[in-house]
Amino acid sequence: MIELEKGTIMTSIRVLNRDIPIEFIAVDEESQAPIIAQAQKMADLINAGDWEDDQAEAFQIMNKIVFFRGTISVDGHDLARPGCDQDDAIFYWQADEFIANSDADVHGNTFFHDCWHVMQFRRAGNKYATGDTEPVEREVDAINEQIKVGIKLGNDDRELQFLRDFRDDQERIKARLRQGIDKAGPHGAGFPPKD
């Protein structure tokens, strides 16, 4: 582990032969070791899976996972929930939400969802989703892929049904894309440059 500053530890997990650094922002030292242990369980479960090429590529796409508490500023946006900086391929994970559910399959499924958003961003020529429909379309696509991965990871029927129900409710999707992001507009948690 590399000591960054007092109370901040940086380490990494290995996901499908790629090291993904972990950083902590405003997370007390006592919480960091259990988070790292849970993240390692997630990585172990992913590493044991039999993945299609694009699923494996998505799992390896993140440059870093940042666990945080409270609200943080990312590319000029205030973030209070998990979200992904698609351009930099950094996943910001709300530490308390991560700790609240210690299931490796749920963590893997959640991580994959935002990994898929980075895939979408790159496949679109490094362009953010715009307008009223494209962000929702990308979210539905990510959920559909997340369901496939969730089945492989061992998500239970209740967890999978939650995803299906969410996918089928565009108003809930739009509300979630706006939730916890200051001035992000229709881009949701993709962190496009501010106007």
Image (cartoon, rainbow, N blue to C red):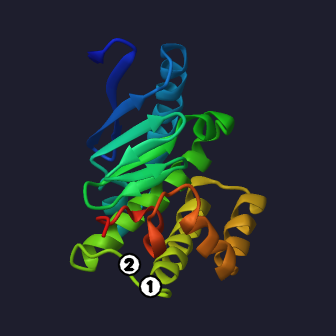
Nearer to us in this view, 8 or 168: 8
Per the image, the residue denoted by label 1 is 134
> Closer to the N terminus: mark 2 or mark 1?
2
Q: CA distance from mark 2 to mark 1?
A: 5 Å
The picture quadrant where one finds residue 166 is: bottom right
Per the image, the residue denoted by label 2 is 129
* Label 2 Cα crowd, 10 Å radius (few <14 / some 14-19 / many 20+): many
* Label 1 Cα crowd, 10 Å radius (few <14 / some 14-19 / many 20+): some
The kind of secondary structure element at disc 1 is helix
Nearer to us in this view, 122 or 69: 69
Question: In the displayed image of the protein, which residue is found farthest to the right?
Answer: 158
Residue 101 picture location, percent across and down: 67, 39
Residue 164: tell me if it is visible.
yes
Q: Which mark is residue 54?
A: none
Residue 45 picture location, percent across and down: 50, 43
Question: Which amino acid lies under the numbered mark 2 shown in the image of this protein?
Answer: Ala
Where is 31 relative to 164, above or below?
above
Question: Which amino acid lies under the numbered mark 1 shown in the image of this protein?
Answer: Glu
